[in-house]
Amino acid sequence: AINDSDKDIRKSAIQRLTSQSTLSHMAINDNESEVRKLAVEKLTSQSTLSHVAINDSDKEIRKLALIRLNNLKDNL
């Protein structure tokens, strides 16, 4: 489902995913910003969140990744 051409199916798949490696892949590589955003919302990988915060083409997704990083840091 994560490789489906329909972004809605990929979004639905992300909602059920728990694998951080798969979520990381989706957050970095998916063409659709909506899909990447959903993946970032579920990520706990600091390295992937840092990568997204620096490199994502969408300003809102970069901001979300920074927020997630700060929340993880506060929970340590």
Image (cartoon, rainbow, N blue to C red):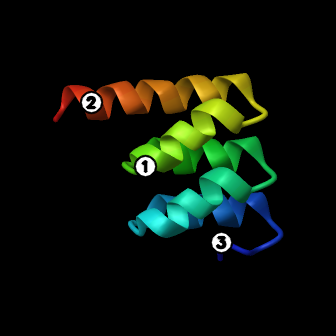
Q: Residues within 10 Å of mark 2 (few under 14, many from 20)?
A: few
Q: CA distance from mark 3 to mark 2?
A: 29 Å
Q: Residue at x 51, y 49 (%)?
A: 48
Please provide percent x and percent y for residue 39: 54, 51
If you read the primary sequence from the N terminus, does the residue marked by circle 3 or circle 2 appear first? Answer: 3
Tag 3–tag 1 contact (CB < 8 Å): no
Q: Foreground: 8 or 22? A: 22
Front label number (3 vs 2): 2
In the image: residue 27, left or right of residue 68: right
Looking at the rendered structure, the kind of residue marked 3 is: Ile
Q: Vertical placement of 4 versus 23: above or below?
A: below
In the image: residue 6, left or right of residue 11: right
Q: CA distance from mark 1 to mark 2?
A: 15 Å
Front label number (1 vs 2): 2
Residue, disc 3: 2
Looking at the rendered structure, the kind of residue marked 1 is: Lys
Please provide percent x and percent y for residue 40: 52, 44
Q: Which mark is residue 74?
A: none
Q: Secondary structure at mark 3?
A: loop
Q: Residue at x 57, y 22 (%)?
A: 63
The image quadrant of residue 13 is: bottom right
Image quadrant where one finds the N terminus? bottom right
Residue, disc 1: 42
If you read the primary sequence from the N terminus, does the residue marked by circle 3 or circle 1 appear first? Answer: 3
Q: Vertical placement of 42 versus 70: above or below?
A: below
